[in-house]
Amino acid sequence: MPDPQSLSQRKTKIIATVGPACDDVATLEDMIHAGLNVVRLNLSHGDYESHANRVAQVRQAASNVGAHVAIMVDTKGIEVRTGLLEDGPVFLEADQTFTLFADDRKGNLAGVSVSYRKLSAGVKKGDVILLDDGAIELSVAAVNAAAIECVVVHGGMLGERKGVNLPGAQLAISAISPEFLENLENEIDFAVAQQVDYMAASFVQSGSEIQGIRDRLNARGSNIPIIAKIENQAGVDNVEAIVAAADGIMVARGDLGVELPLAEVPSTQKKLIQCSVTNGKPAVTATQMLASMETNPKPTRAEASDVANAILDGTSAVMLSGETAVGQYPVVAIQTMSAIALRAEASLREFGFLQTIRMTEAAKIAEAIGQAAARLAEQLQA
């Protein structure tokens, strides 16, 4: 296990998603010893009963260890998914016709239903639709209110309830739209009842969405901090307003890598982190940070560099998803991430990487005082 003193000196927080791989108090205790700071509950998977059980397990483990571990719930947001299939997964061939239907029918090789019934209102002929995190690409051939007829560009095996993405499209929906509001209200009720520490709002596209969620929390007597997940082009375009309204942001690179050209994700990540940090808000960097550790005890060199560079960019926290939720090495993944973070933070001090952040002109007296206090703390190694 890492040296407890070094863990206490690490400034970058580690967030880990819980799931079947760590569904017991003993494993959670080991994860806390390894450097876990925040547990993430992904409300897109599982039911509220199972999530409540995990909250209890985390709190029991933290109590046993004598540590404070924060809990963050991650909402479903405006996710759009394919429906059920008559006979299981289907293999889509390039150039075949495949239709997306605005109803509840069970799908087959000819087409499948989608969860958002008004999807056709946001697409036009020639648009690209991606299924299953971009594994399958469709081109829109014709649109009407009941269906979107497509041609398969890149085929593959399509299972049930797979994600649907429309890169660059501006859908007139949000987490507080009528179609998604009931689910959001239930998620807020759960978060308040469990007294969680953070609420991560998915697919945030505007500051008004954050205010809508905050109003609903306040109506329940809660002031749970809201982390806005930036996952599409609209979120990137409106990041200034989102940062102003939220308590922090998450650079959710999974959907960003589907919604944006892949080559744009690294520079977009830097832009989002800088915006958050210069406005005095924490930033979380997430998705596939140590993805190979789902099945391997050591990460790739590229993954180690990815974690370190996010920290050098100024991220406040780094997040593990499948690595700890379903991976074979949840404890080792946290140990590895902690070791990388400690070394990256040492580089910040050695080579002055934080100067790029510090050089931003302090807009307020309080910011100037804060920058001076941070410099003094580092000089004194406080």
Image: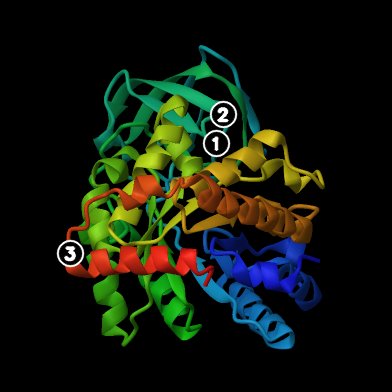
Structural distance between the alpha carbons of marks 1 and 2: 5 Å
Image height of 16 relative to 327, above or below: below
**Mark number for residue 135?**
2
Under circle 1, the secondary element is loop
In-front residue for pair 21/150: 21
Q: Residue 132, labelled with which disc?
A: 1
Q: Residue furthest front?
A: 379
- Foreground: 147 or 40? 40
Q: What residue sits right under mark 3 in the picture? A: 364
Tag 2's secondary structure? loop
Amino acid found under the numbered disc labelled 1? Asp
| Marks 1 and 2 close (CB-CB < 8 Å) | yes
Identify which amino acid the numbered label 2 is placed on.
Ala
Name the residue at 67% across, 82% down: 62
Could you say whether the residue bearing mark 3 is in a helix, strand or loop?
Answer: loop
Q: Which label's residue is closer to the chain start, 3 or 1?
A: 1
| Residue sitting at the far left | 364
Residue 322 x/y as whole percent: 66, 51
